[in-house]
Amino acid sequence: MIFEDRYSKAVRSSNLKSKPETRQSDSDIIGAAGLAAKHSPLAIALLRFFVGGDKSGAVVVEQMTRMAIGKAYRIDYQIGEAAASIIARMVLDWHRDSACKSCGGHGFQVMANAPMLSDQRCQTCGGSAKRPFDLMFQPERLELARWLLDEVERETSIAGPLAMVSLASQLDL
């Protein structure tokens, strides 16, 4: 079971009693995520948000907003906090649900009045099965939005491995 699945189960657990014979109880998993948050707060905040442990996502949006403002400053682009927050929310929304709505995330056109897909690529997504990210943003904000999406994807990919580092010494590998 991958860490994200174990974490999802742990945040919903009604029993957070530690088990001394193992380092894999629900409380250990939550503790490992807490330790990992010291190294990468956004990675664990994203993990918590995506597994449903943080319904609002306010912490994630706040961190992403600060990141966007910092990046905008470094590339000499003027942006206010409200605009950066909108970009952060849009990037987070796309990352959470990127499936093309026209084809249902299949990449092919849905045949009318039939439970089948045609052999024609979806015209909305061009067959990628994802909503067109670039079209969501004004051209002058696209570079910032793409950068923020890359950061979210990078941080999302390191959340589990970061948390596992604190458990690794106790596991039989």
Image: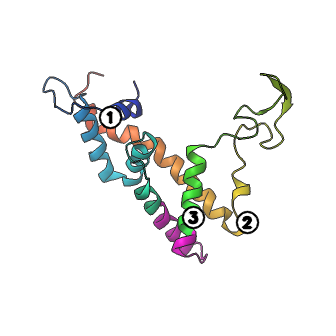
Instruction: Name the residue tied to disc 3.
Output: 86
Tell me where residue 158 sits by quadrant.
top left
- The numbered mark, 1 or 3, whose residue comes first in the sequence reads 1
Q: CA distance from mark 3 to mark 2?
A: 15 Å
- The numbered mark, 2 or 1, whose residue comes first in the sequence reads 1
Q: Secondary structure at mark 3?
A: helix
Residue 68 x/y as whole percent: 53, 66
Q: CA distance from mark 2 to mark 1?
A: 41 Å
Q: Type of residue at label 1?
A: Arg
Instruction: Name the residue tied to disc 2.
Output: 139
Quarter of the image that includes the N terminus: top left
Q: Secondary structure at mark 2?
A: helix
Q: Is residue 34 left or right of residue 143?
A: left
Marks 2 and 1 in Cβ contact (< 8 Å): no
Residue name at image x 70 percent, y 45 percent: 131
Q: Type of residue at label 2?
A: Pro
Residue 11 x/y as whole percent: 32, 37
Say whether residue 69 is magenta.
Answer: yes
Task: Tell me the magenta residue range.
Answer: 64-83
- Closer to viewer: mark 2 or mark 1: 1
Q: Is residue 55 left or right of residue 91?
A: left
Residue furthest to the left: 20
Q: Is residue 25 left or right of residue 142?
A: left
Residue name at image x 60 percent, y 78 percent: 78
Instruction: Name the residue tied to disc 1.
Output: 12
Q: Secondary structure at mark 1?
A: loop
- The numbered mark, 3 or 2, whose residue comes first in the sequence reads 3
Q: Residues within 10 Å of mark 3 (few under 14, many from 20)?
A: few
